[in-house]
């Protein structure tokens, strides 16, 4: 109504649709960006000129600046079944709810003995709690077990998906499981080497080391 | 902008009423500004967060002593902690390792470690010098590829073969217990930049550690 009255040519523009669109996009990007769950470990990876992207099907070991290893596997189903296998191995019972919670979690860095407590924490407390890292010495090699069970379960998962795809007559694209190490630049190399030895003991020799992208082809001057 | 209302001076009751009616419109410009600012921010941050990886193969432990290969054209880097001035450093030697008390039939001179750093004048230069024949060959191939004399796949295959030939430089990366992971990555990255196809991260020998300690003093 007011517009009709001010027909003197005031340069009013109805911005409502634009605002609608802008906020829609903001909401979309905000949600997609924050859907990544907070990691219990902060890792400042060193940079390199490597430009390969990290494959999706991956077991990820993060190593913080103190040298403590954390374990993560992407696929939620595989995670849950890995936990069940670990529970059998270490004779710890997990309720269905705990397994479900574990499926939605990210990296874990606590020994099996305190995993139950860790799962039952509130999200906020979990972020605050200090994880001691997964034990991986030769006598008590939990990290090795995690990797081994994760690997077995991932292979089973791939097989069942393949069978399913074959039944439906679809093509199945198999992506091999890779092993990624995401270590902090300030971590002692020996700590990284210990983790690599856990892998080599399991006869895994090929890794993806996660790095940031370095600017420019020339080596950075210190 | 949008609030160019008539109004003028404070008039009678009638005019006041009308002004109130038209002021239900708000200026949305700042809101749009903000919205687009946020939009830009999220667009930029969400697309650049993809992690990059460096693929690497570790050597399997040889089951037999016979499996150990003698490397002749080998450059060995030993990484260690920062020096007294807080500068990152690395040591290197060329060829086989000889120390006192080791089997040394041909009477080769004892190995000495040379210090270098991670700048482009240090590591980068050493690697370029040592790997010069391979780099030259690869550059020749790249030249041919540019002129379209060879195909894309052929080029890749030839480069791979060039990097892997027996006379190409082999680099061994060793580290003592004080080196940080960043240095290892920097070094491996440098090897990739300098077109070195044969490298391995291996353990440091006890004699080498002794030599490192005495040299670093």
Image: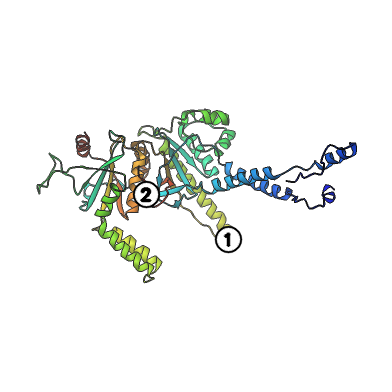
Q: Is residue B122 above or below residue B10?
A: below
Q: Is residue A128 above or below residue A51?
A: above
Q: For residue A66, what is the image quadrant?
A: top left
Extreme residue in the front direction = B9
Q: Position of residue A136 (x, y in %)?
A: 39, 34
Q: Residues within 10 Å of mark 1 (few under 14, many from 20)?
A: few
Residue name at image x 32 percent, y 46 percent: B187
Q: Residue furthest bottom?
A: B149
**Depth check, front residue: A53 or A9:** A9
The answer to whether dots 1 and 2 both sit on one chain is no
Residue drawn 73% across the image and 46% down it: B1
Residues packed near mark 2 inside 10 Å, few (<14), some (14 to 19) or many (20 plus): some
* Position of A196 relative to B141 (above/below): above
Q: Position of residue A97 (x, y in %)?
A: 59, 34
Circle 2 sits in a helix, a strand or a loop, which is it? strand
- Camera sees residue B165: no
**Disc number for residue A98:** none
Asked where in the image residue B211 lies, by quadrant, the reply is top left
- Regarding residue A36, the answer to whether it shows in the image is yes
Q: Is residue B29 above or below residue A127?
A: below
Q: Residue at x 26, y 50 (%)?
A: B126
B205, A17: nearer the viewer: A17
Taking the image as shown, residue B34 lies to the left or right of residue B19, namely: left
Which residue matches tag 2?
B56
Q: Is residue A4 left or right of residue A54?
A: right
| Local SS, label 1 | loop
B47, B31: nearer the viewer = B31
Q: CA distance from mark 1 to mark 2?
A: 36 Å
**Left or right of residue B92, residue A136 in this image:** right
Badge 2: chain ID: B
Q: Which residue is mark 1?
A: A169
B69 sits left or right of A177 in the view: left
């Amino acid at each position: 109504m007011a517009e009709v009255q001010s027909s003197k040519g005031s340069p009013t523009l109805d911005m409502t649709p634009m605002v609608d669109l802008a906020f829609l996009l903001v909401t979309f990007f905000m949600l997609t960006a924050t859907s990544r769950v907070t990691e219990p470990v902060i890792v400042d990876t060193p940079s390199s000129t490597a430009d390969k992207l990290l494959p999706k099907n991956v077991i990820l070991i993060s190593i913080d600046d103190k040298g403590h290893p954390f374990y993560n596997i992407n696929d939620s189903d595989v995670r849950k079944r890995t936990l069940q296998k670990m529970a059998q191995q270490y004779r710890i019972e997990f309720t269905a709810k705990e397994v479900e919670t574990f499926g939605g979690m990210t990296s874990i860095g606590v020994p099996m003995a305190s995993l139950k407590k860790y799962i039952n924490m509130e999200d906020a407390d979990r972020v605050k709690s200090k994880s001691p890292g997964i034990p991986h010495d030769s006598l008590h090699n939990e990290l090795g077990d995690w990797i081994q069970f994760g690997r077995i379960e991932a292979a089973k998962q791939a097989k069942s998906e393949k069978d399913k795809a074959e039944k439906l007559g679809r093509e199945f694209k198999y992506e091999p499981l890779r092993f990624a190490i995401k270590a902090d630049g300030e971590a002692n190399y020996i700590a990284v080497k210990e983790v690599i030895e856990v892998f080599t003991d399991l006869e895994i020799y090929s890794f993806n080391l996660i790095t940031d992208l370095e600017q420019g082809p020339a080596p950075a001057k210190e | 902008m949008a609030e160019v209302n008539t109004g003028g001076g404070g008039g009678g009751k009638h005019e006041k009423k009308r002004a109130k009616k038209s002021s239900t419109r708000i200026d949305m410009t700042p809101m749009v500004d903000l919205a687009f600012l946020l939009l830009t921010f999220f667009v930029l941050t969400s697309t650049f967060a993809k992690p990059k990886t460096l693929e690497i193969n570790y050597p399997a432990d040889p089951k037999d002593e016979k499996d150990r290969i003698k490397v002749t054209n080998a450059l060995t880097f030993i990484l260690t902690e920062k020096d007294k001035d807080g500068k990152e450093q690395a040591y290197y030697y060329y060829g086989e390792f000889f120390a006192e008390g080791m089997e040394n039939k041909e009477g080769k001179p004892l190995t000495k470690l040379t210090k270098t750093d991670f700048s482009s004048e240090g590591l980068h230069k050493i690697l370029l010098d040592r790997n010069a024949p391979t780099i030259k060959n690869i550059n020749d191939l790249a030249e041919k590829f540019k002129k379209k004399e060879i195909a894309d796949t052929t080029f890749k295959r030839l480069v791979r073969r060039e990097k892997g030939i027996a006379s190409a430089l082999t680099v061994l990366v060793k580290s003592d217990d004080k080196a940080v992971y960043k240095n290892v990555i920097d070094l491996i990255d440098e090897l990739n930049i300098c077109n070195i196809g044969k490298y391995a991260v291996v353990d440091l020998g006890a004699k080498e550690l002794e030599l490192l300690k005495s040299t670093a003093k």
